[in-house]
Every structure is written in C-alpha cells, then in structure tokens.
C-alpha cells in the first residue's frame, strides 16, 4: 500500500480534491482541525467531549435556583413598578414562576402553582417577550401579566398594572421566581 503524503507548494499545504476520498474507509469529507463547519448526522463519542479544555457532561441536569422569594405570608402582586433581574442568563433554561392563591379570610396560602413561560425568543436576542397567564376580560377570573426583556447578559422580569386590576387578580400573588440553570 502506498503512503499518503501531504502535498506542499511553496511551503503552503495543498490537498487534491480526491485526497480524503483516497483513504480506505473514509466516506464524504474530513472535518478540518481549524475553522467553522457544519457536521450532519449523529456522532457517538466514546471517550468524552471537551470544549475549551473542559469536559462536557452530557448527563448534567439543570438545577433549580431561587432568584426572588416573595413569601412572607402574603406574596407580591408584581406591579409595573416591580422587577426582578436574573443575572448570567446564558445558562438559564427555564424561568419558573410560582403563584399562590391568597385567601385573606382563610389565613393565607391555599396552594402554589409553578409555571414555566417559554424564554426561547430571548435566547435569539429578540428585544422582549410578554407572558399572560389565563388572560380574560371577566373580572371574576384571575390572571397575571409580566414582560421579560434582555439587558446585557441579564433577563429582567417586570410586572404589570393588570396584576392588581380586579379583586380576582389580587387573589393570586407571586410567591417565588426561580430559574432552572445548567452548570
């Protein structure tokens, strides 16, 4: 079998178009060591993966982190003048909003409801996204409204006037805002 040699011209490396095709067992083209390329298909790495010299764990699960705990027995309406900043948004997979139904006649919390609005739009640098839970014009139905915007590497959650619009809305309070974050 003949050796495969690297061809150079005036000290500059040159490859013939058929160079990779000449190697037995290689189908398609080889991936270059330097530069950006798109590689299609599923690749199975048996010995692990590193990015920037650090091992990447494919089994790493996101962990829950409390960003703001409002629960003092009453919660918070999250009005238009209230906001919460989530720093280092690059490793945030989900924002988790925990609501509680507050019954002032019944002595406090009745139950909590975790909600995870989709923040995918923010990952693609769109300026803002709004989330409305169960929006209704019926004053007997409660809903909450927030806006989420990006500020540098942070996400900013801002409340809305609708959160105290009617008695039904006042019965639902924010108990906690958290994130699911990748390590």
Image (cartoon, rainbow, N blue to C red):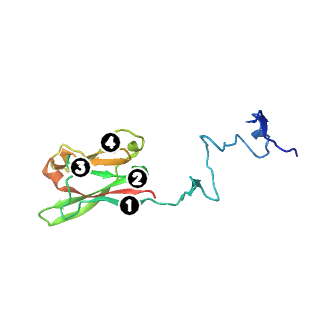
Give whichever of discs 1 and 2 has the lower sequence position.
1
Give the alpha-carbon distance from disc 3 to disc 2, as whole Å: 22 Å
Front residue (pair 7, 74): 7
Q: In which quarter of the image is residue 69?
A: bottom left
Mark closer to the observer (4, 2): 2
Other-residue count near label 3 (Cα within 10 Å), few / some / many at <14 / 14–19 / ≥20: many
Give whichever of discs 3 and 2 has the lower sequence position.
2
Residue that label 3 marks: 144
Give the alpha-carbon distance from disc 3 to disc 1, as whole Å: 22 Å
Give the alpha-carbon distance from disc 1 to disc 2, as whole Å: 10 Å
Task: State the residue lying farthest toward the front.
Answer: 10
Under circle 4, the secondary element is strand
Give the alpha-carbon distance from disc 1 to disc 4, as whole Å: 22 Å
Other-residue count near label 1 (Cα within 10 Å), few / some / many at <14 / 14–19 / ≥20: some
Q: Position of residue 172 (x, y in %)?
A: 20, 55
Residue that label 2 marks: 92
What number is the disc on residue 64?
1
Residue at 77 percent across and 38 percent down: it is: 19
> Is residue 64 left or right of 136 when viewed as pictured?
right
Q: Position of residue 38 (x, y in %)?
A: 59, 40
Give whichever of discs 4 and 3 has the lower sequence position.
4
Residues at marks 3 and 1 touching, judged by CB atoms closer than 8 Å: no
Image: 69 above or below 6:
below
What number is the disc on residue 129?
4
Residues at marks 1 and 2 touching, judged by CB atoms closer than 8 Å: no
Give the alpha-carbon distance from disc 4 to disc 3, as whole Å: 14 Å
Under circle 2, the secondary element is strand
């Amino acid at each position: 079998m003949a050796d495969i040699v690297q061809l150079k011209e005036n000290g500059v490396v040159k490859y013939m178009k058929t160079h990779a095709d000449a190697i037995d067992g290689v189908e398609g083209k080889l991936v270059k060591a330097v530069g950006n390329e798109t590689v299609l298909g599923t690749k199975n790495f048996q010995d692990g993966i590193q990015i920037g010299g650090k091992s990447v764990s494919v089994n790493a699960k996101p962990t829950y982190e409390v960003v703001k705990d409002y629960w003092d027995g009453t919660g918070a309406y999250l009005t238009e003048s209230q906001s919460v900043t989530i720093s280092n948004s690059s490793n945030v997979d989900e924002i988790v909003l925990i609501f509680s139904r507050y019954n002032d006649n019944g002595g406090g919390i009745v139950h909590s409801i975790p909600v995870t609005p989709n923040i995918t739009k923010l990952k693609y640098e769109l300026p803002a996204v709004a989330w409305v839970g169960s929006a209704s014009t019926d004053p007997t139905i409660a809903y909450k409204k927030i806006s989420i915007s990006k500020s540098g590497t942070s996400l900013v959650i801002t409340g809305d006037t609708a959160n105290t619009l009617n008695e039904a809305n006042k019965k639902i309070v924010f108990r906690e805002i958290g994130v699911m974050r990748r390590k």
